[in-house]
Amino acid sequence: MKIHFEASACVGHGRCYALAPEVYDADDQGHCIVKFEVVPPELEAQARAGAANCPEAALAVEDGLSGGARAASARPSG
Ligand code: SF4
């Protein structure tokens, strides 16, 4: 799973990091910081809850990319 964060839409309600502190953090002004480029499987539920509760729709999750599956980069064969 990946998280898409639209920084210009974030106004700093803090719902994301209040609900999912292991996935989202706050900067000095209370705006969201996304901690992961690819969310570990055990934190996907938190990531989803935080994104779903953003009143500004600044967060969206993209399924289908597991943390482990993307870790290894493709090697050229031969
Ligand atoms: S809940 Fe949404 S608007 Fe509020 S800090 Fe998080 S991303 Fe920003």
Image (tube, helix red, strand yellow):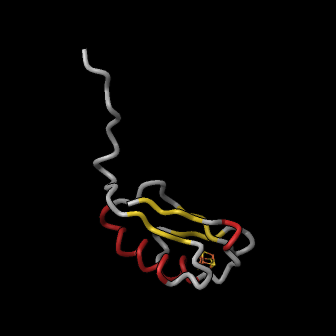
**Nearest the camera: 51 or 15?**
51
> Horizontally, is 8 left or right of 17 in the view?
right
- Image: 72 above or below 44: above
Q: In the rendered view, does 17 fall on the left or right side of 62?
A: right
Residue in the image at 32% along x and 38% along y: 72
Of residues 69 and 64, the one nearer the viewer is 64
Q: Residue furthest top?
A: 78
Quarter of the image for residue 29 reads bottom right
The image position of residue 51, as x and y in percent, is 49, 76
Quadrant for the C terminus in the image: top left
| Residue ID at (59%, 73%) | 58
Q: Is residue 60 above or below residue 11?
A: above
Q: Position of residue 33 (x, y in %)?
A: 60, 65
| Residue occupying the far right of the picture | 29
Location of residue 32 by image quarter: bottom right
The image position of residue 50, as x and y in percent, is 48, 78
Point out residue 60 in the picture as x, y percentages from the top left corner. Answer: 49, 70
Residue at the image point whose x is 57% and y is 78% from the top: 57
